[in-house]
Image (cartoon, helix red, strand yellow):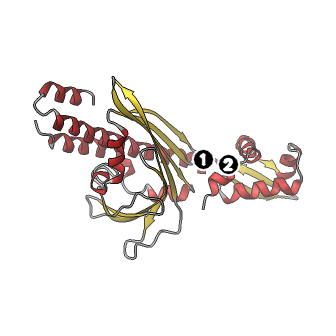
Amino acid sequence: MPVISSERDAEARSLTIVCEFPAPVERIWQLWEDPRQLEKWWCPEPYPATFETHDLTPGGTSEYFNTGPNGEFQRAWWATTAVDKLRRIEFDGGLADNDTKAHDPDGVMHGTITLEPIELGGKPGTRMTALTVFDSVPYMEKMLAMGHEEGSKMALSQIDGLLTGIPA
Amino acid sequence: MDLIFHALADATRRDIVARVLQRPHSVSELAAGYAMSFAAVQKHVAVLERAALVSKERKGREQLVSGEVDTIARAQELLRGYEQLWRARVDAIDALLAADTSADTSADTSDNSDQRDRK
């Protein structure tokens, strides 16, 4: 399993996930940098994300929306605050108004992603640490309202979809 | 913006949260435990209150400070849900990488089945 540890800190409203992938950091970086690849995993089925803009440079902004199976539609934003290419990404994010795309003033989450080259079975691999901090419990409630209970279900259906796409 | 980070960045404030989660304390009772003024402790409590980590209630002449157990329990529950989302993301990334590998070695079917078995 690629997830090697996961730590929830309720008082700090933070989640730290550490995982290892059998691919070099350059490949993992592409998955963050290229919006077409990012949307294949950022919001798994059945709430896929579509990135309208994505700029992984300091001060860059990303705008995306999620759609759901029952006609749900939610816009969200992401602002990259710091980047150390192939090593580290820091960003703020939150929900956005569906009509005006204005950032929801109710709250924000902070993400810090760290990538480290490792060796996995004699081949180049990547250890990725993803730290997320929410600034309040009510905002966590609001941000996670869409589909978080379906997390495990959507993972399975998306993996099936991806595996079907693999040339035999 | 960054209320929680700020609130918990200070050792005294973390200590206050730990104490009031066990039982409510009055501000003067808390102040007795630290080498600082009543006003300074009151300021720390105010920072924690803004981050919804503690709540204050007037009881007679005293202000009782309590840990927001419900807030913290709810945070735990929400984080569990968020962790599932991240696990789903990681699995989706792993599936994308597996697709890379099988595209590289599409002639080699044994390698392809290895990738599937690893799931």
Q: Position of residue A86 (x, y in %)?
A: 41, 45
Residue A21: image location, x then y, percent:
35, 34
Return the residue nearer the eye: B105 or B112: B105
Q: Left or right? Give the position of B118 relative to B46.
A: left
**SS at mark 2 in the image:** helix
The answer to the question of whether label 2 and label 1 lie on touching residues, with beta carbons closer than 8 A, is yes
**A69, A6: nearer the viewer:** A6
What subunit carries mark 2? B
Residue A119 sits in quarter: top left
Is A45 placed left or right of B23 in the picture? Answer: left
Using the image, name the chain to which the residue with label 1 belongs.
A
Spatial separation of the CA atoms under disc 2 and disc 1 = 7 Å
Element type where label 1 sits in the image: loop
- Count of numbered labels shown in the rendering: 2
Q: Which residue is mark 1?
A: A12
Query: Which residue lies at the image location 86% right of the left edge and 48% below the top edge?
Result: B31
Would you place residue B110 above or below residue B5 in this image?
above
Q: Dot 1, how many residues are within 10 Å of its Cα: few (below 14), some (14-19), or many (20+)?
A: many
Q: Quadrant of the C terminus of chain A?
A: top left
Residue of label 2: B8
Q: Relative to residue B78, is residue B13 drawn left or right?
A: right
- Quarter of the picture containing the N terminus of chain A is top left
B19 or B10, which is in the foreground? B10
**Quarter residue B89 falls in:** top left
Rendering coords of residue B80 (x, y %): 46, 43
At label 2, which amino acid type do we have?
Answer: Leu
Q: Amino acid at mark 1?
A: Ala
Q: Where residue B9 is drawn, which disc sits there?
A: none
Instruction: Return the x and y of residue A28 as percentages of the image width and height.
Output: 35, 43
Instruction: Check the image and report above or below for B19 versus A83.
Output: above
Residue found at x 52% / y 60% = A108
Q: Decide if residue A1 is in sight here.
A: no
